[in-house]
Amino acid sequence: MSKNQINESALSLQVEDLLVSRNLRGMKTVQPALSTGYYLRAARTLYKCKGHVLIGTGFPVVDTFETDGPVGAIALYEALEKLGATPVIVCGPPVSQALMDNYRVHEIRVGEHQERTLEAFKALYNYNPDAVLSIERPGQAADGGYYNMRGESISERTACFDTFVNNAKCPTIGIGDGGNEIGMGNITEALKDLDINAAATCVDELLIADVSNWGAYGLITFFSLWSGRDLLGEFEPLAILEYLSKLGSVDGVTRINELTEDGLPVDEGISVIKELRGLIGYND
């Protein structure tokens, strides 16, 4: 099938099913709570962006940050830049300090403080973004706190991106893989059977994947299709992981500084990219 014969709605369903097929943390189980076509709708929103796109990422693990999230954020950043947008990664230390030498970074303050809303208002006013996207970013639970997959409080080490999402005057998108990320408030009821202190923050479009990084690849699949350019084939997850590892990242599951994401070898992510490229006719 040639690229111009691809049914976009059918492709979105294929992408959605592929990205939760391993069901590592219950995302396949909760998928029916989402209206099909979510990857297509989110990709359309982002593809039209020609101004700033704010990308919130960085999940604190011990005293550093995990590999899941920043890898996808960087892949999206590079793809959006090639399409003419001006992406900005929004995060707190230490991930902000790690990335700012090579990327546009807007640093936000870590921990509980009274300026969270003001911090967001100032940034939203200054950037006037076309879209605000969160990828593997902790979302506030119903009690206002932040929790990791083990149910441990991480509020002291988390910078608040929820206020950006809640106050944005543009489309908001959330990517998550477990239930405690920004956007999961969209499917609160479906998450009740999962062993997770779920996030309550909502977004206009929630995207789920077995690994949040892979959600970025789902979006880039559509960018590649529409631009006629193999954007999925233009970045190397291993190279990004090596870059982050040198800056102190750890795997969110093992908590070890290694070239993995959520306990999986990098080959898993590369295999997902290969499958996604195959769906749009890149079969090399």
Image: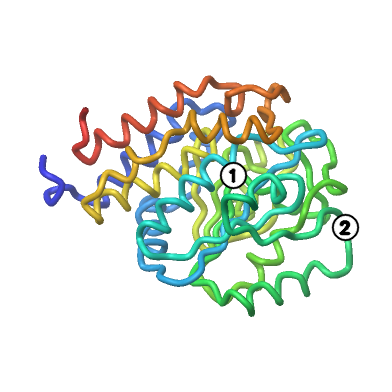
Question: Quick check: 208 left or right of 56?
Answer: left
- The residue at the point 52 percent across, 73 percent down is 170
- The residue at the point 71 percent across, 66 percent down is 163
Residue topped by disc 1: 190
Residue kind at label 1, given as amino acid type: Ala
N-term-proximal mark, 1 vs 2: 2
- The residue at the point 57 percent across, 50 percent down is 102
Question: Quick check: 166 left or right of 174?
Answer: right
Element at label 1? helix
Element at label 2? loop
Residue reaching furthest to the front: 101
Q: Position of residue 52 (x, y in %)?
A: 51, 69
Residue kind at label 2, given as amino acid type: Glu
- CA gap, disc 1 to disc 2? 29 Å
Nearest to the eye among marks 1 and 2: give it. Answer: 2
- The residue at the point 23 percent across, 41 percent down is 280
Residue topped by disc 2: 112
Residue 174 sits in quarter: bottom right
